[in-house]
Image (cartoon, rainbow, N blue to C red):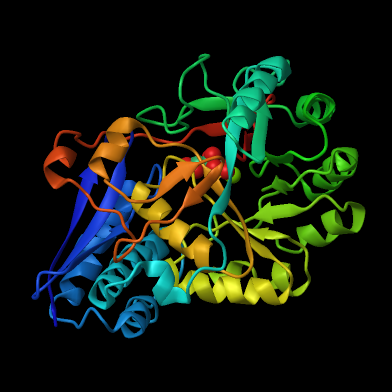
Amino acid sequence: MKISDAYTIVTSPGRNFVTLKVVTDEGVYGIGDATLNGREMAVVAYLEEHVIPALIGRDPQRIEDIWHYLYRGAYWRRGPVTMSAIAAVDLALWDIKAKLAGMPLYQLLGGKSRERVMTYAHCTGKDIDACLEEVEAHVELGYRAVRVQAGVPGIPTIYGVAKREGERYEPADSDLPAEHVWSTEKYLNHVPKLFAAVRERFGDDLHVLHDVHHRLTPIEAARLGKAVEPYHLFWLEDCVPAENQEGFRLIRQHTTTPLAVGEVFNSIHDYRELLENQWIDYIRTPLAHGGGITHMRRLADLAGLYHVRTGFHGPTDLSPVCLGAAIHFDTWVPNFGIQEHMPHTEETDAVFPHDYRFEDGHFIVGEAPGHGVDIDEELAKKYPYKRASLPVNRLEDGTLWHW
Ligand SMILES: O=C(O)[C@H](O)[C@@H](O)[C@H](O)[C@H](O)CO
Ligand SMILES: [Mg+2]
């Protein structure tokens, strides 16, 4: 069997997605998610110019060899663009292998470790009361876990909250980056009130998560982690920019609040100190940015040695292809933690037909051979690409900060 063709499909049903389709000379094909929000066309160029030509003629069953060909062979290793391109190929090849085996991907990985996959919903609001109403609505839908984000008095636009009430939240909302303003002090003085209000109204059993989105320094994160201990969060996410893994030592010394990190990481090497020192509790890198199944299952196994669990990134800026593969991975992985769930739009789901389903706050994996997600190429053509950039963030004095 040989790879006879491979090509990218860029489609924008409400937002941009990049899909890689890998076709074999025996007709079986696989698809992978190559979406990197705000940098989509960099991954398309990497795939079309430097990866696809080298794939044609190779045996698609040699997943491990192709992975190393693309990783070691790149010379310029790692990084979000490279690892997203490798991930797209890897997801497509695992899709092909599972189809050839006539089994759903989770079986190929090692079978079910659970019947269904717990998810967390995004509950956001312009203020605490609006956020609580969202929590109420999602608890009624059966969610056991909610991520709460609310506006902060004195900060005009805040991460995670839609600009206008009732609108879907999509951060890549302008051709060139929008400029947001941030105040750490206003945020730190306000956000503990959000968790107090959630616990007051919904009690102790609901899992409550929060995303700080890289905006604090380690000592500020230590202050926040300590301040929210009475509300026993499920996790505090991305509390500091994590290139400096050592920064987590300081946070860990001050608080028992569990820490999640890694949606902007793309390899096992980004995590080594964090895991060996047990400075974190959940790994977030999604399959589509972390080199695919081949790499991420190694990371999950390493994390498991240190009691760390998976908590895959799963916003609407990863396509149903990544989500579908993630649900198979989540169904198998022994040290599963939780799966992020931001529902895609109906037009997105129509472009990406899939057999996973959502009920009662959980995903149920499908039984179709492969990862169970396809792409309707004719329908995809209806939605042309339009550049969309993530915002930048400035402190009140104009300093360019972390968005
Ligand atoms: O926890 C999350 O889901 C993430 O932080 C997203 O909200 C990112 O901002 C987005 O994926 C960037 O494209
Ligand atoms: Mg996040």
Q: Is residue 253 above or below residue 317?
A: below
Q: Residue at coordinates 20% horizontally, 34% vertically from top-left?
A: 383
Q: Residue at coordinates 20% horizontally, 83% vertically from top-left?
A: 59
Quadrant in the picture for the N terminus: bottom left
Q: Position of residue 78 (x, y in %)?
A: 46, 69
Q: Position of residue 92 (x, y in %)?
A: 28, 66
Q: Nearer the viewer, residue 154 or 100?
A: 100
Q: In this view, does 84 lie above or below 136?
A: below
The answer to whether 2 appears left or right of 115 in the picture is left
The answer to whether 271 appears left or right of 253 in the picture is left
Q: Would residue 330 be visible to someone looking at this image?
A: yes
**Quadrant of residue 372 in the image?**
bottom left
The answer to whether 366 appears left or right of 208 in the picture is left
Q: Nearer the viewer, residue 201 or 396?
A: 201
Q: Is residue 374 above or below residue 11?
A: below
Q: Where is residue 179 in the image (x, y as percent from the top left)?
A: 52, 26
